[in-house]
Image (cartoon, rainbow, N blue to C red):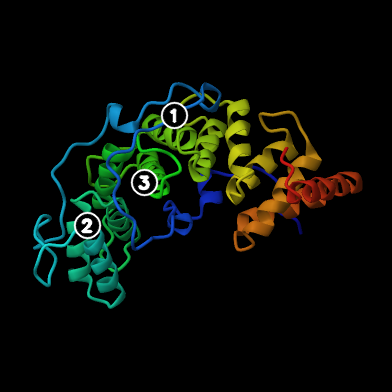
Amino acid sequence: MAAGFGVGPASAFDGTRSPSDIAPAVGLDLAPQNDITAPALAPSSLPAKAVAPSRLPGIVPGPALAPPGIGLRAPPPGGGQLNAIDAFRSGHQALAAGNVKAGIAALEYAATRGHVVAQWKLGRMYADGTQVKRDDYRAFRMFQDIADERADDSIGTTQAPFVANALVSLGLYYAEGIANSPVKANPYRAREMFAYAASYFGDAQAQYHLGRMYHDGKGGEKDGRQAARWLTLAANKGQPQAQALLGAMLFKGDLVPRQAARGLMWLTLARDAAPQDKRITELHAAASAQASDDQRAMALTFIETWLNGSRP
């Protein structure tokens, strides 16, 4: 029996709040770059004037954080002074060998010397509870440091995906808040984070979450046109949750004019990209069962065109 067709809450598509499954790959030799200036953005790429999150009010202040018993500015175990790249490599190898204390000490050492991936890696570890006890506020502070220091970095650089991912992580934390911490739910702030990462860095995850907020009316009024705009940008980059939500909107005519065949196209692409996502599979099955033969045939034509490189 086909599942009832509808657009569920954000968690139905997200699965988890953490974007760790789409996070950038960690490169051992990524060097910090301090002399980069950000290029100007074309006005047509922005929903509004983009302002770096570090320039916006609302950042939660606090002292630098370090694991208990480990000084941030102390050299990593083994003696001698390492540069940031060597410290990051040492930390990565220590973690791989199961030496968590030494690994974190080395990553902290690299992080305080401007190694973006070390900062990001620590944030992800605490956000996901990987080899350490989960600590969302500590993770928040790591991602916040990246946003404060790197939000104006040039797009297209090796560290840009890590900066964008940190901004998305901050947006997700602001969307829900962090229990027993100074970080309270602030959907307006979350939308700002997503908007900056989506417009400046062109990050597909940020574009999806921004489109979702416009669709749900969180952090501002509902806006079907803006929702469809940002979801389309993410969907064309292969982001399956964006494809699914956009497909659902188009198939139903939810906040946008109904285009059933094109909606089924996006739902099919989403199902193929994320077959493990039960919600997407149910949405596709429901739409396919309701579609006419002509709509299903047209959807297949759209899919073939899309796979050949043409984008709607």
**Which of marks 3 and 1 precedes in the sequence?**
3
* Image-quadrant location for residue 153: top left
Q: Nearer the viewer, residue 127 or 80?
A: 80
* SS type, badge 3: helix
Are the residues flagged by discs 1 and 3 in contact, CB closer than 8 Å? Answer: no
On the rendered structure, is 58 left or right of 202? left
Q: Is residue 4 visible?
A: no
* Quadrant of the rendering where the C terminus is positioned: top right
Give the x, y percent position of residue 126: 29, 58
Labels 3, 2: front one: 2
- Distance from disc 1 to disc 3, alpha carbons, whole Å, reads 20 Å
**Which of marks 2 and 1 precedes in the sequence?**
2
Q: Is residue 161 visible?
A: yes
Q: Nearer the viewer, residue 183 or 241?
A: 241
On the rendered structure, is 135 left or right of 275? left
Residue named by callout 1: 219
* Three-letter residue code for mark 1: Gly
Q: What's the residue at 45%, 32% (across, down)? A: 195
Q: Nearer the viewer, residue 220 or 145?
A: 145
Are the residues flagged by discs 1 and 2 in contact, CB closer than 8 Å? Answer: no
Find residue 84 and name its label: 2
**Which of marks 2 and 3 precedes in the sequence?**
2
- Distance from disc 3 to disc 2, alpha carbons, whole Å, reads 19 Å
- Distance from disc 1 to disc 2, alpha carbons, whole Å, reads 38 Å
Badge 1: how crowded within 10 Å, few (<14), some, or many (20+)?
Answer: some
Residue farthest front in this picture:
35
Find residue 166 and name its label: 3
Give the x, y percent position of residue 182: 22, 40
